[in-house]
Amino acid sequence: MSLPDPVAEGVASGWRVLDGAAQTQDLQLTCDVLIIGTGAGGGMTAEVLAQAGLDVLMVEEGALRTSRDFRLLEAKAYPELYQESASRKTADKAINILQGRTVGGSTTVNWTSAFRTPPDTLNWWGERYGLKGLNPPAMAPWFDMAEARLGIADWQTDPNPNNSVLERGCQALGLKHGRIRRNVRGCWNLGYCGMGCATNAKQSMLVTTIPGALQHKAGLLSRARVERLLPAADGKSLLGAEGRLLAADGHSLNGRQFSIKARHVVLAAGAIGSPAILLRSELGGGQVGKRTFLHPVVISGAVMPQRIEPYNGAPQTVYSDHFMHTQPLDGPLGYKLEVPPVHPLLMGVTLSGFGQETTSLMQQLPHLNVMLALLRDGFHPDSQGGQVRLRKDGSPELDYPLNDVLWDGVRRSWLTMAELQFAAGARQVLVLHEQASLQSSWQATREQIMQLPLKPLLARVVSAHVMGGVAMSSQPEQGVVDEYGRHWQLRNLSVIDGSVFPTSIGANPQLSIYAFALRAAHQLRDALKA
């Protein structure tokens, strides 16, 4: 069965698209607005500015891959669509980080969960960072606009059996829970969103705003790594950016370079990429890279008596915020409960242990429920996040220390998840820790959790929500950009992505980035058209 591929058809019809790997000469380009990165921030910004008649050029480090390339195969998807083949890690290797690296960025590979920024987070930003313009009533129209553009709506289909475990456990224990809204249109309910949507149902930037920009004569240069921004002689503005073109493998260099002159530069390379470009450019001041947050995630697995096939069906449709609002925002870390899809490769590299016990657990994959807790970092005084820095070769790495306040949240959330899974009928439960083992009762699991040593590389910690590093603030000395993403020192530089958030969100961040980007892009459009 052959499905339409509107992006490939658009390229064939003459969209202004260049593949860095195909270039045989150095490139020297000009535009009104250079947008570095094509994820949630870059995609939204590109469409708004291109529709206004501005000459927009998008530059993306990853390749342009479309639905015909998405084959529901983990071994193909992770190397092609993710940063460092889905194996990016913090400096001490204790946290694995999933980030997209393709046209559309993480929106191409996320699991479609859409939450507005919690009002208490926005209010906190206003009180602590002076970001008064981002209060809940002021942001509501931008959320409305993003939801309309991307088809974000209630998911009408019943949760798959994997998500139903969380719902059933919450019902049994009397915990608050709800259904997750999704950015899909005509979803086939396959469950392979993390490998790129083969049916174009997911309303990622790849199939919405980027085509929208290209249809308005924007340009796209893929497989092109920006090395540095180019400051003007006065030190108060930018001339553009320069970098290197990549070969067909997407990683090695093809020997050609590019430079782009632009009237305005939008940095939208994500919460590790954007600070890294500023650091390589020696721009931005002492705040760049600091206070980078991860929503650190810990995991509990359960063997269910019935076959639940956690790899089939919409990946995330049930959540619980019960433990997000039971304590002060700056108290012990709150956590959001969700359920991820479980596919063999990702499960194999995430499971703790080895040998026969791990083999046996892998063989039970069709019966496996996995629950995760996202810890809300950035509010407690001892939750200062991590710092992006550069390796000797100029590539970025994130140093994110795991401390007592975070370990406290890890243990509490393990206890919650294990109790929920047994309440939902689990036969056995295993929290992901190198010294944990399958337990057959809630009491035995609780005793084991209380005895587990909490140290990096023993407890399995992952993340798919990198935020911060180029924080917004109301005063130049407290951050890097203002509440519209305008750089405090460089008059023609904006930063429009998740790196501007001064704390974590406390929810999956894609919708927050969309709404912030729309607000910032409309302000930038009006300024450039004035």
Image (spheres, rainbow, N blue to C red):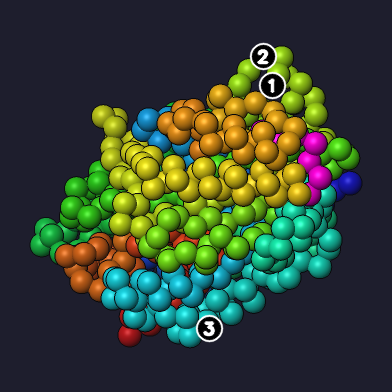
The residue segment tinted magenta is: 424-430
Viewer-closest of 120 and 510: 120
User: Was residue 438 drawn as part of the magenta stretch in this picture?
Assistant: no
User: Was residue 426 drawn as part of the magenta stretch in this picture?
Assistant: yes
Which badge, 3 or 2, comes first in the chain's sequence? 3
Whether residue 52 is visible here, answered yes or no, is: no
Tell me what residue is drawn at x 74 percent, y 26 percent. Answer: 361
Q: Quadrant of the C terminus?
A: bottom left
Which badge, 3 or 1, comes first in the chain's sequence? 3
At numbered mark 2, what does the secondary structure look like: helix, strand or loop? helix
Say which residue label 3 marks: 141
Toward the left, the furthest residue is 234
| Residue 394 sits in quarter | top left
At numbered mark 3, what does the secondary structure look like: helix, strand or loop? helix
Say which residue label 1 marks: 358
Instruction: Tell me the amino acid under the disc marked 1.
Output: Thr
Instruction: Tell me the amino acid under the disc marked 3.
Output: Pro
Q: Position of residue 23 (x, y in %)?
A: 46, 39
